């Protein structure tokens, strides 16, 4: 008997029952993106948080800070420099949302534009999912990632998470894919290959922006060589920020897309 077979029989099943049943998600102690309580800044004009943010995710208007989760890299610098304690550390790692507007707090200057974009595809998406089965086939395209997101994606296929048990699979061909999963800020060199992949996918098809680079450009987006993620390049059906998002957050986001789970963040606010 091979050694690995004996080891497997001795150790037993290594796959977590989560998320189908209560069990470990493998993310104990993992930091999430920061929480914001803008009321703490009332009457205390300060822009330390915005100055410290390396991704330009924080704006301050009328002494009130707003955080764009789509651009937040989770560096926690805002929690360290804020003298009012408006930004606090959280363990809220599951951020998968169906609309860009849900990553913006009320009063954010870009909120109206984000809502207009979300409403355009929401009705069609709901109709398409009525006929959608319980399986999902994913084509992944790296558009200039640092490979941090790719490392987390690989972990989905290990024995602990075993993504296939949920009916979710990766496919090498866009012609067999339901979901186009994109990482990276979309460099100019990868824009055309990305669009060709999208065009090769059969209808109905969906797009997931995975990681802060894909959702908002991260720290390198907007330069001469790359876009600010997928916004304005392809219609996005699922947004998952994080630098990088951990495997459990990716699984939850995919289940949100499949209507098997509800988003934990709405209007930039965490579910309490």
Image: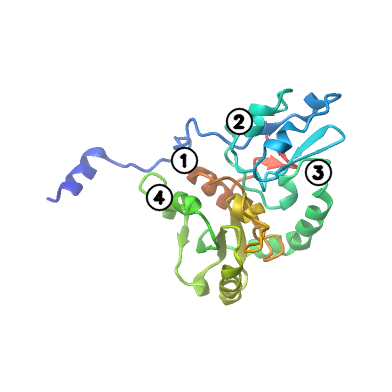
Nearest to N terminus: mark 3 or mark 4: 3
Q: Is mark 2 on a helix, strand or loop?
A: loop
User: Which image quadrant is residue 47 in?
Assistant: top right
Q: Residue at x 66, y 59 (%)?
A: 223
Nearest to N terminus: mark 1 or mark 2: 1
Residue of label 3 = 108
- What separation in Å lies between label 1 and label 2 (alpha carbons)? 21 Å
Q: Residue at x 72, y 44 (%)?
A: 68
User: Is residue 164 left or right of 260 when viewed as pictured?
Assistant: left
Nearest to N terminus: mark 3 or mark 2: 2
Q: Where does the image place residue 189, in percent across and percent down from the top left?
A: 57, 70
**Residue 162 has which mark?**
4
Q: Is mark 3 on a helix, strand or loop?
A: loop
Residue of label 1 = 18
- What separation in Å lies between label 1 and label 4 (alpha carbons)? 11 Å
**Residue 90 has which mark?**
2
């Amino acid at each position: 008997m091979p050694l690995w077979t004996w080891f497997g029989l001795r150790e037993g099943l290594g796959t977590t029952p989560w998320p189908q049943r209560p069990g470990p998600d493998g993310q104990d102690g993992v930091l999430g993106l920061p929480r914001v309580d803008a009321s703490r800044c009332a009457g205390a004009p300060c822009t330390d948080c915005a100055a410290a943010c390396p991704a330009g995710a924080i704006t301050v208007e009328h002494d009130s800070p707003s955080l764009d989760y789509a651009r937040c890299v989770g560096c926690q610098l805002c929690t360290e420099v804020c003298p009012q304690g408006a930004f606090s550390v959280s363990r809220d790692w599951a951020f998968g949302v169906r609309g860009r507007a849900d990553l913006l707090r009320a009063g954010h200057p870009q909120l109206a534009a984000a809502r207009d974009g979300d409403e355009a595809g929401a009705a069609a998406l709901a109709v398409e999912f009525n006929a959608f089965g319980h399986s999902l086939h994913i084509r992944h395209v790296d558009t200039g990632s640092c490979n941090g997101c790719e490392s987390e994606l690989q972990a989905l296929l290990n024995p602990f998470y075993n993504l296939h048990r949920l009916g979710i699979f990766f496919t090498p061909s866009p012609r067999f894919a339901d979901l186009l999963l994109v990482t990276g800020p979309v460099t100019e060199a990868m824009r055309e290959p990305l669009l060709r992949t999208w065009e090769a996918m059969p209808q109905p098809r969906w797009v997931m922006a995975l990681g802060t680079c894909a959702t908002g450009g991260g720290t390198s987006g907007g330069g001469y060589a790359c876009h600010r993620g997928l916004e304005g390049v392809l219609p996005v059906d699922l947004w998952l920020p994080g630098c990088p998002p951990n495997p459990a957050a990716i699984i939850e986001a995919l289940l949100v897309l499949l209507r098997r789970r509800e988003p934990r963040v709405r209007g930039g606010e965490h579910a309490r």
